Amino acid sequence: MSKPTPLKSLIDDTGYKTALSRLSELQRDRDVAQRKCEEIRGQISRLSAVAAKGDELDRRAASLIAGDGGTAATLAQLREELATTQDHARVIERAIQLQQGALEKLRRDVSLEICRQISPQYREIARRIGLAYRELIAAVVAEQQFRIDLQNRWVDHDALVSPVPPGFANAGDVNSAPSRFLLRLVEQHYFSIDDLPAPLKPYVPGPQPAPTIPTKARSQAARQFFG
């Protein structure tokens, strides 16, 4: 087995880390802009209430409470400031959307490169699964043949509890799910054709659809599956 390639994180990629940091900055800027909008709305609400009473002293006091140092900010000025801040907030929100899209694309690209680098290591794991699967199929076929031999000798074999896993009852059939699994391993380049049991080799997917074995020949194929 080759030396394992150290697994990387997305954060290990400088470009992704920088893009993620920029997204966080934009989100903080958006929060600041939204808070400012709320503050201005509060100022407008207070000054509008005072203006309705026509009390200049109260209006200036309300302006002081709002943090304007007692200056006589007009409602028109506040509304203009609110519109400007809201527009800025919309620009930031759009920038966040664009940055999120760019970050997602970068995540896919970096992930693809990481997977490319570790593919030999993963292939070894996948082959271990495939080889174990193949051995399990061979054992199931042997168990089935053992029962057939007992049955041909008129032996009641009900006392033998079957250890066959669910879904493997017809494992010797080249059209079964276990057999198709082995064929997929070849298609995904985890297995070579030589890794397959002989009866499966003609059914490796190619440019043309793989043939389907006739029903009458299935029992015979099962008997010779690992012969």
Image (cartoon, helix red, strand yellow):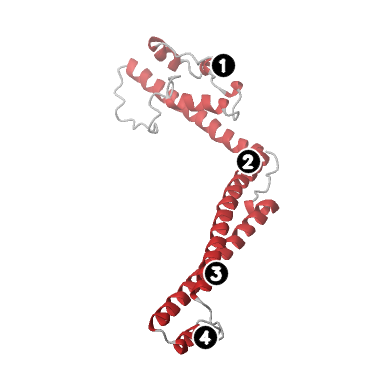
Query: Which badge, 3 or 1, is on the more N-terminal residue?
Result: 3
Give me the C-alpha separation between circle 3 and circle 2. Answer: 46 Å
Q: Mark 1 — residue?
A: 207
Residue 187 lies left or right of residue 56; in this view the side is right
Give me the C-alpha separation between circle 4 and circle 1. Answer: 80 Å
Q: Residue at x 63, y 41 (%)?
A: 112
Give me the C-alpha separation between circle 1 and circle 2. Answer: 26 Å
Image spot of residue 197 (x, y percent)? 53, 20
Give me the C-alpha separation between circle 3 and circle 1. Answer: 66 Å
Label 4–label 3 contact, CB within 8 A: no
Disc 1: CA contacts within 10 A as few (<14), some (14-19) or many (>=20): few
Where disc 1 sits, the SS reads loop
Where disc 3 sits, the SS reads helix
Q: Which-is-in-front pick, marks 3 and 1?
A: 3
Query: Which badge, 3 or 2, is on the more N-terminal residue?
Result: 3
Q: Mark 4 — residue?
A: 64
Query: Which badge, 4 or 1, is on the more N-terminal residue?
Result: 4
Give me the C-alpha separation between circle 2 and circle 4. Answer: 58 Å
Residue 166: image quadrant is: top left
Where disc 4 sits, the SS reads helix
Query: Which badge, 1 or 2, is on the more N-terminal residue?
Result: 2
Q: Residue at x 59, y 27 (%)?
A: 191
Q: Amino acid at mark 1?
A: Pro
Q: Which mark is residue 112?
A: 2
Q: Residue at x 65, y 52 (%)?
A: 16
Q: Amino acid at mark 4?
A: Leu
Q: Which mark is residue 63?
A: none
Asked whether 209 or 93 is in front, the reply is 93
